[in-house]
Image: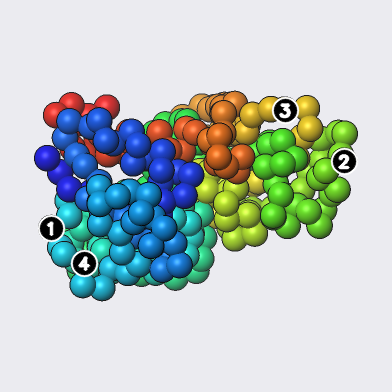
Amino acid sequence: MKSLLLLGYGAMGREVHKTLRDNRYARVKCVIERRERCEVLRQQLDGEVDVLSTVEGLANDFDLALECAGHDAVATYVPELLRRGIDTIIASVGALAEPGLPERLEHAALYGNAQLVLVPGAIAGIDALCAAKIRSIDTVSYTGRKPPRGWFGTPAEDRADLASIRDATVVFEGNAREAARLYPKNANVAAMIALAGIGMERTCVSLIADPNVTRNTHTVHVSGDFGQLDVTIAAETLPTNPKTSALAALSILRAVENRVGPVVM
């Protein structure tokens, strides 16, 4: 039985933990959360797992860490986990838009002989995009379309009256690095596409608030020597967080299965 460390116990973290309770090969043994949430979380989990606010003093006997805590957690906790030799799966891929952080994580992984795993999250086709990059990719574009409520609490509120718009409204146009930094809770998909393909600066991103859709919709268009790739996902959100696609949590769970199960796909 593999021992797992879970970073973050928000909507995604809860979903991941709930599903892993029935996993035959792995169990969450410890959760890292913000200090002010730890005591309440200990009461909620009632001794099922350890709850800590820091990785200092953490035992090194974890087989795998799962990050579901957001961009700050990637910069704060993940380098230390990698240096300790703990393989780490991250959901908040958009954090890698921060200059210098990818190199810092790579150096930590090399030092600890560990592996950093980026999950596709709410988008499909990443395997094909990574394969196409081996030869040559000419263009990559990504369009993210969500109901207006999915953009509450983001810079989109300065671009449109989200509570009353009736037509699809572009709230951002630019490259993947800008999208990931301005919309950290919405643009992990854009960052993943960029990292898998032609980079942050060359990946074109449009983000749209659309009152006519009920699901978070992600569309990717890629062209290159391999031919053409078009992918569209219309994803249901987690019931407790309209900014997070349910498929993002499932992507973490699939990555765990591929690390601990006897068959990998």
- Measured as percent of width and height from the top left, residue 79 is found at 32, 67
Question: Residue placed at 69% from the left, 27% from the top?
Answer: 214
The answer to which of 219 and 95 lies nearer the viewer is 95
| Amino acid type of the residue that numbered disc 4 sits on in the rendered structure | Leu
Mark 2 Cα within 10 Å, few/some/many (few <14, many 20+)?
Answer: few
Inspect this view and state whether residue 115 appears.
Answer: no
- Measured as percent of width and height from the top left, residue 177 is found at 58, 58
* Between discs 1 and 2, the one toward the N terminus: 1
- Measured as percent of width and height from the top left, residue 241 is found at 57, 42
Picture quarter with the N terminus: top left
**Residue 36 tag number:** none
CA gap, disc 1 and disc 3: 45 Å
* Between discs 1 and 3, the one toward the N terminus: 1
CA gap, disc 1 and disc 4: 9 Å
For residue 234, above or below residue 27? above
Tag 1 and tag 2, C-beta contact below 8 Å: no
CA gap, disc 3 and disc 4: 44 Å
| Amino acid type of the residue that numbered disc 2 sits on in the rendered structure | Ser
Closest to the camera, between mark 2 and mark 3, is 2
Viewed as shown, does residue 118 lie left or right of 242? left
The answer to which of 45 and 225 lies nearer the viewer is 45
- Measured as percent of width and height from the top left, residue 144 is found at 65, 39
Q: Which residue is mark 2?
A: 164
Mark 1 Cα within 10 Å, few/some/many (few <14, many 20+)?
Answer: few
Question: Residue placed at 50% from the left, 69% from the top?
Answer: 99
Q: Which residue is mark 4?
A: 58
Q: Which residue is mark 1?
A: 61
* Between discs 3 and 4, the one toward the N terminus: 4
